[in-house]
Image (spheres, rainbow, N blue to C red):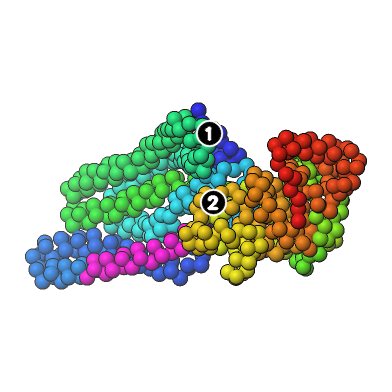
Amino acid sequence: MPINRIDEDEALRPTFKIKLLIRLFSYLKPYKFQVALTLLLMGIVSGVELLNPYLLKVAIDRYIATKNLNGLLFLGLVMSITILVSMFCTRKRISLMAKITNQIHLTIRQELYAHLQKLSLSFFDHRPAGKILARVIGDVNSLNNLFNTSVTGLIPDLATIIAVIIIMLAMNYRLALASFLMLPVLIIFLGAVEIVSHRRWQIFRQKSSNLNAFTHEHFSGIKVVQSFTAEEQTKKDFHFLLRENFEAFIRAVRLNDLFWPSVELSWGIGTIIVFWYGTRLLNTGTVTIGLLVAFSGYVSMFWRPVMNISNFYNTLVSNLSGAERIYELMDIEPSIQEAEDAVTLPTLRGEVEFKDVTFGYQDGQIVLDQVSFRVAPGETVALVGPTGAGKTSIINLIGRFFQPQSGLILIDGFDLQKVTLESLRGQMGWVLQDTFLFSGRIIDNIRYGRLTATDEECIAAAKAVHAHEFITKLENGYDTEVQERGARLSFGQRQQIAFARALVANPRILILDEATAGIDTHTERLLQQGIARLLAGRTSFIIAHRLSTIVNADRIMLIDQGRIIEMGNHQELLHKKGYYYQLFMAQFRFLAAKEEPVTRLG
């Protein structure tokens, strides 16, 4: 059985629907004029529809009964003109409303995407990318018809029902009351169906999200799937999720299918009641044939918008769960927020100071325990220690991707909690072990470090890190399209592009997180001059398990269990013969056994 749990973001929560609808329909405010014009066009169409049964009554009782052919032809001409007007107004209404709904659709998706970009890394750490994608694409798409049907259908249909009720009561209140007998029964039935149907649509959206997440994850990791010959198990897992999604859809649709037949049944029974009761009134002389024919038309005009409203209600029930999921994300506040009085950092010198910083990713968990240190501008500091010691947490806190539970982090004397994120991160450069390249040209991936960089600056950066040689050998050079995550390039080539990207950014604070891990010795030697150029004049933090790469660092901090247990340069730490000495000698003996020469920075 595949992983198919209900995550925190997938939990089913009751929602106050009126509040949600008000929030959704607030997107119509910028289009008040267009909506008003749409309603006017719909009003004209409804007026024509309301007039036609009455004209039919007049034709039967006044002109056909008296064999007045001229009057009948004139009335036919009037009805033809009104129908043509109705057709024109309907076409204009459809075109106008399509533009409005598509623009609202675009606005919601843009707002959701912009909001997601502001959320902190902790949000993305706990949610599969596929489930987020399902909300940005699938759930937003589910709202596509909601606005159109509500404006062009719901409001005019409600107005039509009210007008028809008034006309029917004025013509003959007895027949009118007979026509409405089935309405209370229908309302009670549909209300009961909606309670169950709404939850079933929530479950369907959830299952669709699970399926989307599984598909995205396994195609992203297709190399692992194929490497371990797990195709058959993956197919079984996919079939399991697909079946769950299918069954959830069928369960939801099965209830939705009750809406239309129940309205048609009520319509049919109501019409039978009208004709049965109307024929009895014919015998009393209180009802004419023309009136009964016209009344049957108004009965249809009464039940048709009732059916339309039930269809809208059906659409609302099935799509409201998508809106709920969208606003669940929109209502999540970033855990890292700028202070109202946040200041913009000037050009940094690069002094970094931690004062008794305690941090954990979860409550009760301590990753860093009262860590204190100061790094001078331009100093290169290497962070060394076992996996899980807290090295990556330190650089994440410097970039303010997470918030410490206590203590202060200062850059050039500025408290990070009181500066704007853009002015901080805009002066930092990152080269990570897991290099991410976007689909597109190589030169655009380099330019991502600074979007205003010229082609010449990007090429110069590539030359500095010795990436120019391999790039020019590609079929289109710097215009070569790389696939998602740079799949066409080797690991070392992707790292060289990442170094070029960081160099183009011209950061004041540079972070190298296992930047040369996994690179062969030859490629690493090519990178040394580029790395030295990157480090020159910048405050740099280097995380490395291969100690031979950080022997020239100004300072080495050995971190274990969230504390700094040793600090000094390479020679000082070797002289102490402490934990760093033991670690370095163990790696040295291992490299000597492999006959791998020790590389140096610079």
Q: Which residue is mark 2?
A: 489
Do the residues under discs 1 and 2 have CB atoms within 8 angstroms?
A: no
Q: Which residues are magenta?
A: 81-110
Residue at the (54%, 32%) spot, across then down: 3
Q: Residue at x 62, y 42 (%)?
A: 126
Disc 1 marks which amino acid?
Asn
Give the overall secondary structure of the magenta segment.
helix
- Mark 1 or 2: in front is 2
Q: Earlier in the sequence, mark 1 or mark 2?
A: 1
Which residue in the protein does label 1 denote?
A: 4
Q: Is residue 509 visible?
A: no
Residue 26: percent from the left, percent from the top?
53, 60
Q: How many marks?
A: 2
Q: Is residue 572 left or right of residue 12?
A: right
Q: Is residue 226 above or below residue 535?
A: above
Left or right: where 270 falls relative to 213: left
Q: Secondary structure at mark 2?
A: loop
Q: Give the x, y percent position of residue 325.
A: 54, 47
Front position in the image: 34 or 248? 248
Quarter occupied by residue 388: top right
Q: Is residue 251 magenta?
A: no
